[in-house]
Image (tube, coloured by chain):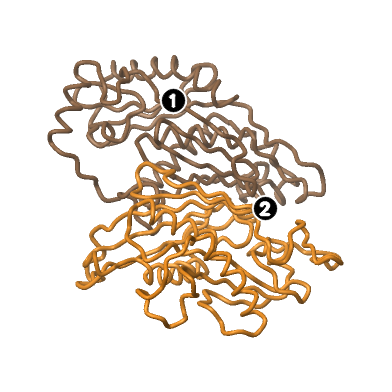
Amino acid sequence: MVDVEPVEKEIQLLDANERRLDGRALDELRPIKIEAGVLRRADGSAHVEWGGNRVLAAVYGPREAHPRHLQDPARALVQCRYNMAPFSVSDRKRPGPDRRSVEISKVTSEAFSAVVFTEQFPRTSVDVFIEVLQADAGTRCAGITAAAVALADAGIPMRDLVTACASGKIAGKVALDLNKEEDNFGDADDRAADWGDRPLADGRPPHRRRVRPSDEALDRRHQADLRDAEGGAPPAVLHRGVR
Amino acid sequence: MSAEVISELMREHIVKLVASGKRADGRVPEEIRPLKIRKNYIGTAEGSARVNLGNTDVLVGVKISTGEPYPDTPRSGVLTTSCELVPLASPTFESGPPSPTAIELARVVDRGIRETKTVDMEKLVITPGEKVWVVFIDIHALDYDGNLFDAASYGTLAALSCAKMPGRMTGGADKPLPVDHWPVSITAAKIRNTIVFDAALDEERIADARLTVAIDENGDVRAMQKGLSGSFSYDEVRYVISTARRLGNELRRTIQA
């Protein structure tokens, strides 16, 4: 996250029993609450509370793509916009897109382009708007999860629900779903999105994937995260950063 | 903001209804939609409120930090109001720099707050000419179903009323933001020759003129804004103000609660 406050002494992120600051095990997620259909105007919407994150996603479309020169005669565009409310972080964020949110918007669009049956809606655009209302690390993953539910709520045909989860290293150990302290003071972080029974970048044709419930996919994502971070093949990594 | 298409059939229907003293959602002309306010909705903000005015949904966050005063007002804090009409809230909102609509909205809300001296700006001074509290009000529209002006205004007042000046920035305890006055904004819309209050989206889209009045707790007018290309007669303005005075008291109690 952007807001790092100066600290006097080193923070101990893991105790002797490998419990984290908030009492979680290394492979344990923060509490997640998902609600679909929360907005009236949007074609589909979802609100996700994930630890201290609060994210709203809305879907409009398929609708006429603007600007028109972007229209694809063969398929729909999936255009995602990730935006943080100015009050969502401890130091106010200036309104409007910055380089970070543009990048997150881009990779999120790419993640969903792979699962929406875009060929069914040529020349149109499926617009996904993600608003971070309250941030506590892992907002892009909460945003992707909210967007997946909003797309389903809008009745957009998809191969599966995309889910996303961050992982990282704290005190030398791989941990899932870092919170703000761990993100700020940990060793490294990365995020991945997946769906079905394999990560996105496995190279198998999409129609041969089996559709599984999203919680199971999420569960596998966690196992995959642990494997990958310990030297396995990288999954569809949305962003990897080392601080 | 791209204009939304409304069918002639719908337009005529609404015009006929309001001419006979009725409205599409069953309200009478002077009736405000149900107002629901959730204060301290956002933990990362120093003050916040989520406002539902009927199906219009607005989130207002207040961020407070320390900074320098403006050179011409060394004995006054700084207060800024911004508004984002994010495309999540309506198919007619587009991403990009703030639209003229969003800027007008932020400025009308700001005027209502500022001209009532809602926040005692002198109490925001830490060291005159050097260090003051800087208050950012950010209005975030979430679901647009008409009358964002009033929803944003109620949200702003509610968020300011529960905002804290963070002690961590000055090495003291958190202190509540000094909120002394309670201006309530009421917006009337004129459709042909009829006036309705708190217009819903379909009414707002066909309105010829709009009048926003901010009334303080003494019933005095503190700010006004007339919008759109139509006009109000002198008698109509008097009617809007007297109705706003009457409606304002109950709304104020809801915001203060």
Instruction: Kindly state the secondary structure of the residue where label 2 is placed.
Output: strand
Hey, which quadrant is residue B53 in on the image? top left
Q: Which mark is residue B67?
A: 2
Compared to A95, does A209 lie above or below? Answer: below
Which chain is the one coloured orange?
A
**Is A138 left or right of B247, judged from the image as shown?**
right
Disc 2: host chain: B
Q: Earlier in the sequence, mark 2 or mark 1?
A: 1
Dot 1: few (<14), some (14–19), or many (≥20) neighbours within 10 Å?
Answer: few
Q: Residue at x 23, y 69 (%)?
A: A71
Q: Which mark is residue B60?
A: none
Q: Position of residue B122 (x, y in %)?
A: 67, 37
Compared to A53, does B240 lie above or below? Answer: above
List the residue tagged with mark 1.
B34
Hey, which quadrant is residue A70 in on the image? bottom left
Instruction: Kindly state the secondary structure of the residue where label 1 is placed.
Output: loop
**Is A169 left or right of B50, judged from the image as shown?**
right
Q: Position of residue A242 (x, y in %)?
A: 66, 78
Residue type at mark 1: give it. Pro
| Colour seen for chain B | brown
